[in-house]
Amino acid sequence: MRWAFRKKSFTSFKKNQMSSGGSLNSYVKRFCLAFSAVFLAYQVATGSFAHADEVSDACDYVSRKVSTFKGGLYRQAPETFEDQGKIYRGCVVTVVGDRNKVPGRFPPADSPYPKPGSAAANAGWKADREADGPDGTSYRISRGNIFCLVSGSWDGGDASDPRVIPSPLFLISARCARIR
């Protein structure tokens, strides 16, 4: 009896839809469209797209600066990461390369750093944390409500033994997100 009731309900629904000029398929499409419109309106109202664009622009800026050589591996993707005990959602740029293939000055991890008078400094980027050594560099840059953690690591060799040949490989990562 239940099956017959369900069949009758579906049949009468289908007849009503057909008589009103629509089909089940068109109603599903309209529902999906309406749901998408409501979801999009919510996203715009909360401003998450604007923040995502700013974070994406920051990642694009850093990636243009650090990937100025050929033959390396490059990845840029949205990810979550931790900084000083807080979890951030943003994007991560990872570059692996060979220092022998980097034209100009090594390391390219220094390229996004806002030195006084540089294009980065003139664009409003400021450094607020930094550490540097023979095997790498790490700093945080920010502009407005966006920050990027940039770190580079490489084999700096052994100062006590000049016979040691350092590996030419290096790794640069940048993690960008909105400041909370």
Image (cartoon, rainbow, N blue to C red):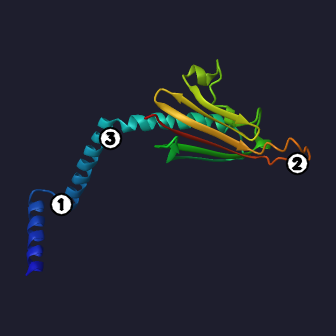
Of pointers 1 and 2, the one earlier in the residue sequence: 1
Depth check, front residue: 173 or 85? 85
Depth check, front residue: 128 or 60? 128
Q: Going 8% across and 62% down the picture, which residue do you hit?
A: 16
Q: How far apart are marks 1 and 2 (CA)?
A: 75 Å
Q: Residue furthest top?
A: 117
Disc 1 on helix, strand or loop?
loop
| Residue type, numbered disc 2 | Val
Depth check, front residue: 179 or 121? 179
Of pointers 3 and 2, the one earlier in the residue sequence: 3
**In the figure, 89 relative to 113: above or below?**
below
Q: How far apart are marks 3 and 2 (CA)?
A: 55 Å
Query: Dividing the image into 4 quarters, which one contains the N terminus?
Result: bottom left
Residue carrying label 3:
43
Residue carrying label 1:
23
| Residue type, numbered disc 3 | Gln
| Horizontal arrangement in the rendering, residue 47 relative to residue 61 (left or right) | left
